[in-house]
Image: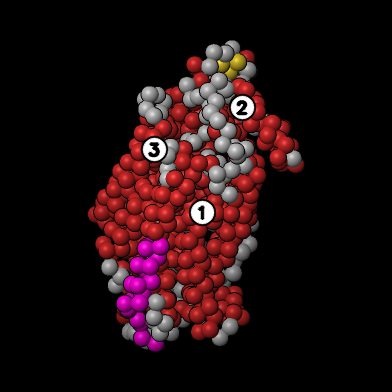
Amino acid sequence: GTMGRFTVWDYVVFAAMLLVSAVIGVYYAFAGGGQKTSKDFLMGGRSMSALPVALSLTASFMSAVTVLGTPAEIYRYGAIFCIFAITYGLVVLCSAEIFLPVFYKLGVTSTYEYLELRFNKYLRLCGTVLFIIQTARIYIYFDLISFFPFQTLYTGIVIYAPALALNQVTGFDLWGAVVATGVVCTFYCTLGGLKAVVWTDVFQVGIMVAGFSSVIIRAVVVQEGIERIVNDSYYGGRLNFWDFNPNPLQRHTFWTIVIGGTFTWTGIYGVNQSQVQRYIACKSRFHAKMSLYINLVGLWAILACATLCGLALYSIYKDCDPWTAKQVSALDQLMPYLVLDILHDFPGLPGLFVASAYSGTLSTVSSSINALAAVTVEDLIRPYFKSVSEKKLSWISKGMSLFYGGVCIAMAALASLLGALLQAALSIFGMVGGPLLGLFSLGILCPFANGIGAFVGLISGFIISLWVGIGSQIYPPLPERTKPLYLSTAGCNITSGNLTSTANPLTTVFSTPTAERPALADNWYSLSYLYFSTLGTLITIVVGIIISLLTGGLKQNTDRKFLLTKEDFLSNFSWSKSERVKKVEVFNQNPFTVADEGTDNPAFSHIEMDVASNENKVNGLHL
């Protein structure tokens, strides 16, 4: 049939999504007496329950890249991407059982507070600065590289990239969409704080599922049943679930996804401020853990939806690939192309799909803005300006949200001018996720790790990660490493003169001739992108342990509350009792208590950040 264009109804649906998001922000600005303190604003008063936080974690995990990029990834490389279902399970397990218990019992607002409590203020500053320049997560377009790089830059790309893809296919207004999403996002973050971020995420995850569902249901109807989609995918080699090749240079195999993916994503779920800030805002540790486990179901559901969309894409276009036939200029335009192709007779449904892509953008950017505000206030303002009142800090938090929102919109403009350059810079600095995970793991799991070991480990991990990252940008892996699948244009009713070879279209992309590639290019620099984080984490831990042992780490007596202990694990079997005990312990240890707010979240005892002022302890060590 003929391709559709956007109608008035599509714009109405999109505008309604933005309006509801803004209204939620206004509601939480005034609900329950408003945001009186910075804790209310940044942590939702630590009174959140498991379900909304779980949906919020799922929503911000899913940027527009998941909506546009994952189906295209499955169309191009096959359903081996589904193995991430196992990875997500391992990531949630590690985050809930290793990192959450320690962060929760300390009641920190910023995860980097932990680095000062456990090591020293210089490592806290390192972590904070790295986070502010870097981000929650990044999927570089077309290669789905999932990492953390430059937070503010990244949020600019996350706003701009989907707007560009949708604009080129649907004619949806590019800068109207960029400015509208940026402004609405900043508006509800600044007014409503964490509660607004969480509840808009809950609404947006509903929109995302609805957008995916409309595409899947219509595709099944068009193809006259799910059997045909599965058969086409099977005969087209798309159901390549199992590839047990142990070669670490292969882009996606069972092992790279399970091992590499687990390290990469634990760096996000376990220690990254954007995610941790939400689950430690829960009213009890039971709710915090449940939010992670319920979120796992959400991650699986989203992955299943994206996979079905990818297989439907292949089934519908198996004989005429729009990308090779130059109908679209990039793989992330395939989903909008499909939507206009099969949903153009249903006014409003293409708009619903665009709203679902932008819901992904909003949820990711809002959690980034809120996390940036939290880190700035807790790590850069509170420790150095101790006389500032809670009410003033609350206003400063709002000011920071407004500031970072403005920066993100500016970065979207920058992304439009420096697209390719930014992508390369982002993926290189994205390597910092692994070393940071290694740093927190040293602190929580190794009682003998000290500040010197942790610092040298962090720097070593960072240098090695940067080396492999920069190398992989200069010498991209060859197609036999990425294994793109066959695409056909045999069924296209256009002249064959327009077509390029379809057997391996990516071979033309790489400008570096094989003869000129150095020896390292085809082994070290061709390492699967998922192993970059693994490499950084392991080097940080190993170097950190060796240096700590050489500098007297065994002689120090680290305070147990900064470590993962047997009690933390056993408390899984007696939640209410252990949490009450924990709370009393923290109250007794800390001379700076505040009134109990009727929850069992120990954060209300507000551990004084300048640990040196606690007479008998410095940096978590008994003197």
Residue at position x 48%, y 35% in the image: 110
Residue where numbered disc 3 is placed: 394
Q: Residue at x 27, y 63 (%)?
A: 176
Residue 100 circle label? none
Q: In the rendered image, which residue does mark 1 sit on?
A: 56
Furthest-front residue in view?
A: 33
Residue nearest the viewer, comparing 296 with 550: 296
Under mark 3, the amino acid is Ser
Q: Amino acid at mark 2?
A: Val
Element carrying mark 1: helix
Mark 2–mark 3 Cα distance, whole angstroms, equals 25 Å
Q: Which residues are magenta?
A: 1-20
Judged by depth in the image, the label closer to the viewer, 1 or 2, is 2
Residue 522 percent location from the top left of the image: 46, 49
Q: CA distance from mark 1 to mark 2?
A: 29 Å
Residue 600: which quarter of the image? top right
Alpha carbon distance from label 1 to label 3: 22 Å
- State the image coordinates of residue 476 (x, y, percent, origin top left): 41, 52
**Crowding at mark 3 (Cα within 10 Å: few <14, some 14-19, many 20+):** many
Q: Residues within 10 Å of mark 1 (few under 14, many from 20)?
A: many
Q: Is residue 155 above or below residue 561?
A: below
The answer to whether any part of residue 66 appears in the image is no
Q: Is residue 409 above or below residue 403?
A: below
Look at the image and say whether residue 12 sits in the magenta stretch: yes
Where does the image place residue 398, in percent across and percent down from the top left?
36, 42
Circle 2 residues within 10 Å: few <14, some 14–19, many ≥20: many
Type of amino acid at the residue the image marks with label 1: Ser
